[in-house]
Image (spheres, grey):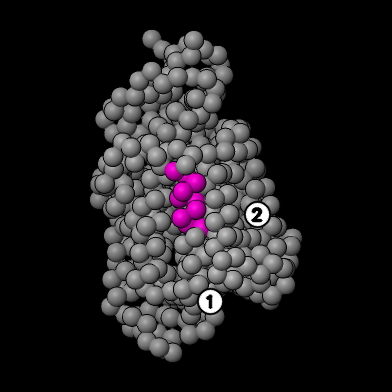
Amino acid sequence: MSDLVDARGLSCPQPVLLTLDKMKDLGQGELTVLVDTDTSKENVIRAAGSLGWQVKSVDAAGMGYTLTLEKS
Amino acid sequence: MSGIRKFFASRAGIISVGAFIGVCAALLQKWGNPGNMGICVACFERDIAGAMGLHRAAVVQYLRPEILGFVLGALLAALAFKEFRPRAGSAPIVRFVLGMAAMIGALVFLGCPWRAVLRLAGGDGNAIFGLLGLAAGIWVGTLFFKGGYNLGRSPSTYTSVGLLMPLIILGLLALRLIFPQIPDQPQSGILFYSVKGPGSQHAALAVSLVVGLAVGVLAQRSRFCTMGAIRDLILFRQGHLFFGMLALLGFAFLTNLAVGQFKPGFVGQPVAHTQELWNFLGMVVAGLAFALAGGCPGRQLFMAGEGDGDAAVFVLGMIAGAAVSHNFGLASSPAGVGPHGMAAVIICLAALLFIGFTMRQKSA
């Protein structure tokens, strides 16, 4: 079970802020991020890349997306 | 579709959109819009408030089609790319107040962030103080974010809720068509039209509307945001959106040079005053309000088009703020800051700090 950030319904820059905070806590491993807009999806993926995290999968879930990010 | 998606999420995409807006804004001035005001979200919403008679400043009354185009263009793009997400209910009263404060601050400076950049691109040195103020206000906003400031989640809702703002905009467009401008008349049916001043200067309806629609579509795709540009740079050291803002500046400047609109200086600039401190502080207020609300005034219009009812409330707050600004003598003019503009800046700053310090419920 990977760690989870639920950023659904949050406006900019909260989804990125929460994701980056969690990534700094974890250092590496797997992280699941829930977002509900395409803007948040793009922003989280872009920010994750800047810390060296890779996108493992992007799944459309209901009205949003489940992003699985990883860093080894 | 996925190729288009990828392009607009890329650096080349955001730069293209900034460049497009810069060129169009400079050309709109050539085609009739006021000096260094090819596109100004704050000024144009203020003009719309005037057109509806919400304030009676006779020189700034015109139902600006660009603003209508922004919302409708964003709606069309959101529908085409299946990104229309009806959502509402995240601290609406706070967003309304943030919109009011943002407009009051912007009208002390005389421009939104877009116009601050356009003023600089036209050679108006006073814009430097406005842009510094904008950055300072956004920087204060990032401190609140780091401290846990959060407006709360915006739940998804009925499609009709997300459509309300675009429908209001369609209603305004209908009014504009039913009551067209009558030459040299201050009124046409229920709409007010400036016969002199900035409100009387505008490109043709179709030109303004088409440019507005195109900008709405492109900005929705690229998430163009001038507040986010500075915020992301400060908060995340990330320059993605900032490249878009730089492109706007660069291409508006080049277009101005090409058509002979670049006039460097501080005194006698179009729709501007030279009180540096208040140019700076007005934009501190606006920048902080945009930061706390999560988007520059343009971005709020595009989000309203995507179905975001909270962004729509911010827009309505800005329109109410414009009415208050002119009715209470808060707005500046080329002669300088309005009689109560300085007091308004201080009160708005206090209101924004109150919101920033007290809304700290951690959502994680």
User: Is residue B12 something one can see in this rendering?
Assistant: yes
Return the residue nearer the eye: A71 or B135. Answer: A71
Same-chain status of marks 2 and 1: yes
Q: Secondary structure at mark 2?
A: helix
**In the rendering, at what x and y percent does residue B239 appear?**
57, 38
Q: Residue B20 colored magenta?
A: yes
Pointer 1 chain: B
Name the residue rendered at 74%, 62% in the picture.
B276
Name the residue rendered at 54%, 80% in the picture.
B197
State the CA–CA distance, disc 2 to disc 1. 22 Å
Name the residue rendered at 47%, 68% in the picture.
B28
Crowd rating for badge 2 (residues with CA inside 10 Å; few <14, some 14–19, many 20+): many
Residue B183: numbered disc = none
Residue B198: numbered disc = 1
Looking at the rendering, the stretch of residues picked out in magenta corresponds to: B13-22
Magenta portion: prevailing SS class? helix
At label 2, the amino acid type is Leu
Placement of the N terminus of chain B among the 4 image quadrants: top left
**In the displayed structure, does residue A12 sit left or right of residue B124?**
left
**In the rendering, at what x and y percent does residue B188 appear?**
36, 84
Residue B131: numbered disc = 2
